[in-house]
Image (tube, rainbow, N blue to C red):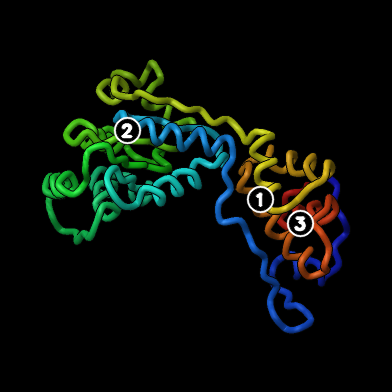
Amino acid sequence: MSALPLRRNQVEILAGAAPTPSGKEVEVREPAWVETPTSTKIMAALEFARTTPTIAIVFGAAGCSKTTAARRYAEDRKWGKGSAYYVCAGRFNRSPTAILHLIAEATGDYIGGYRNDSIARSVLERVRERSLFIIDEAQHLDADALDGVRYFFDAGKIGIAYLGNEEVYTRISRKGRRAAFAQLHSRVGMRLHVQRPTDEDVDAVLAAWGIRGRRERDYALQIASQPGGLRTLSQVLRQASIYAAETKRIVDRGILSAAAEMLGLVD
């Protein structure tokens, strides 16, 4: 990618550090939520897992709206019958006990210190049928935790959605691993592979930011094709919008390029 040369004050503005001439910091209205064709597919998969109920695996590259769509879906179904609960696994909560505690915390007021079986039963008492547990970054879970969450599906008819990268799918479904996860694999009723952001996804993001133009779209498609996908594109748009607001310009190809260079996305 080519980039504009940046003066020092431009770098500071793009970093969000420079104030306006009035002394106030630049404020940019970032879209709180952008519905894209891919996010619509993800939310449909979550809804299928909840209402059927079944176990779903939504997997693929980073920056394809998996997390934002899951959080939005859970927020929309926060109250009432058939709720959805979002938790995110990680390197520090990958065990059966750790993920169980996260689920318990997500479903209501919870104080630790009880046996795992007591916590699990308490969760089932609070959560109604045709609800959904969304486990994001599920590739971090160890084997016992990944399979253990299935308890809520078996005992409570609660849908489960595992979100993550390619690893979470191969661990459950690859032929060499099916013996270890036979009970879990046989219960998976939905598989959605999100490979990369589509052109239509990028168009939806640009429209939400109010950015038009063929050159701008072509450049945005280049950015979204990099690791990080739409997440990377959103970072570039945020920085570019700060600079455009300060200089009273519209976001054009040159400003996008400058923002990408400032973020270290240009070799």
Q: Name the residue under label 2.
A: 51
Percent x, y of residue 25: 68, 76
Percent x, y of residue 264: 72, 53
- Crowd band around label 3 with a 10 angstrom C-alpha radius: few (<14), some (14–19), many (20+): many
Q: Mark 3 points at which residue?
A: 259
Q: What residue type is labelled 1?
A: Ala
In space, the residues marked 2 and 3 are separated at their CA atoms by 43 Å
Q: In which quarter of the image is residue 45?
A: top left
Q: Which label number is shown at residue 153?
A: none
Q: Which residue lies furthest to the top in this view?
A: 175
- Crowd band around label 1 with a 10 angstrom C-alpha radius: few (<14), some (14–19), many (20+): some
**Screen quadrant of the N terminus:** top right
- Horizontal side of residue 242 vs 106, given as left or right: right
Tag 3 or tag 1, which sits nearer the N-term?
A: 1
Q: Name the residue under label 1.
A: 208
For the point 83% across and 41% down, the residue is 214
- Horizontal side of residue 157 vs 37, given as left or right: left
Find out whether the residues at labels 2 and 3 contact each other: C-beta distance under 8 Å: no
For the point 13% across and 45% down, the residue is 121
Q: Is mark 1 on a helix, strand or loop?
A: helix
